[in-house]
Each structure stands twice: as structure tokens, then as C-alpha cells.
Amino acid sequence: MSGCRDEDPRIHGIKTKIGVVPNFPKPGIMFQDITPLLLDPKAFKDAIDLFVERFKDNNISVVAGIEARGFIFGPPIALAIGAKFVPLRKPRKLPGEVIFEEYVLEYGSDCLEMHLGAVEPGERVLVVDDLIATGGTLCAAMNLLERVGAVVVECACLIELPELKGRGRLNGKPLYVLVEYQ
């Protein structure tokens, strides 16, 4: 499901605050820059509010944010819905015992780590990131969480690039996005 189909007037304001930077970080990539959104308190608050409105009554106990930009959106959502925030980090960023999930990206491979014991079996989880492209990172996050017995309720992203078909890789898991770019 996409927030942009709901015709909420806040969506237009959010979309105008997302910049596109061609050929960054490498040739052929059209980087979706959320910095202008973060610099506009109203647009940033509108984005958080839309996510909170969607998830406040879903009995979610964990918001898992994917490094790095999932760390921007995840904590305010978690606080607003009364859930804990769990960071899913790149390798070797967390002290102590971790569980990890390796995955393939469109331009290489990577890994997500989470503190062992951060999520308990049966906890209801919302996975948050800024963008879904091919879906590899969200799939890795879901696999990691499900391996410890969590129930991934839904994924939420600010931006979707539908032409890269990432939604189709989520095995039917619901995905809520605010803005789609063709």
C-alpha cells in the first residue's frame, strides 16, 4: 500500500522535499536525497505523522530501523506508538553478541547485525527504512528478525522505486510507502 494513493495533501509536501542526485554514489544511480525533507520541520513531521497514523493501533512492540536512514525515521515512530527501537546495523558496529544476515545488493553484498536478545520470540515488528529499491535489504531484515522468532507485521519506507520490483521480493509481506518514483 502506498500513502501517495490516499491523496493526503501532506504527501505532496513530502514529495517536493525529496531531491534526486544523478550519478551518486556511482554512475547510473539516481540518489534519492532526503536531506531537504529533514531540513523542513513541517514536511519531516508530516512524514512521521503519516507513519504513526498507519501503525499506532497495530500492537507493534518493536520498530526495527535499518542503518542508516532507518535510524532517522524509526525512533520517532517507535516513541509515538509506544514501541522499543532496535537498530539493524552494518557489520562490526554493535558491541557484544550479535546475530547477522548476509544479503546481495544490486551493486555488491552486505550484512545486517542485531544484538542477540534485542527482540524476543513472538514480538510484533515493524521494519523501517527510507527507501525500497530491489528489496534485498528489507528481505535481509525480515529474515534476521524471523530467525529469532519475531513476527514481522509490515515494512515501511518513505520512498519506493517500483520499477526495481523490490515489493515483489517481500514474499507478500505488506509494504507501506509514502512516495513512489518511476
Image (cartoon, grey):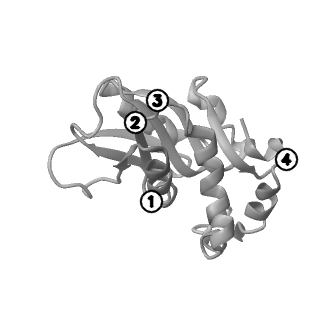
Q: Are marks 2 and 3 in contact (CB under 8 Å)?
A: no
Q: Are marks 3 and 4 in contact (CB under 8 Å)?
A: no
Residue in front for this viewpoint, 116 or 5: 5
Mark nearer the viewer, 3 or 4: 4
Mark nearer the viewer, 4 or 1: 4
Residue in front for this viewpoint, 90 or 154: 154
Residue at disc 1, secondary structure: loop
Give the image location of residue 82, x and y in percent: 42, 44
Q: Earlier in the sequence, mark 3 or mark 4?
A: 4
* Residue at 61% across, 23% down: 172
Give the image location of residue 166, x and y in percent: 63, 38
Residue type at tag 4: Glu
Q: Earlier in the sequence, mark 4 or mark 1?
A: 4
Dividing the picture into quadrants, the one containing residue 134 is: top right
Residue type at tag 2: Ser
Q: Which residue is mark 4?
A: 7
Q: For the N terminus, which image quadrant?
A: top right
Residue at disc 4, secondary structure: loop
Q: Are marks 2 and 1 in contact (CB under 8 Å)?
A: no
Q: Earlier in the sequence, mark 3 or mark 1?
A: 1
Which mark is drawn over residue 61?
A: 2
Q: Earlier in the sequence, mark 2 or mark 3?
A: 2
Residue type at tag 1: Ala
Which mark is drawn over residue 152?
A: 3
Residue in front for this viewpoint, 9 or 115: 9
Left/right placement of residue 169 relative to residue 68 reads right
Mark nearer the viewer, 2 or 1: 2
What separation in Å lies between label 3 and label 4 (alpha carbons)? 27 Å
Residue in front for this viewpoint, 82 or 84: 82
* Residue at 14% across, 50% down: 96
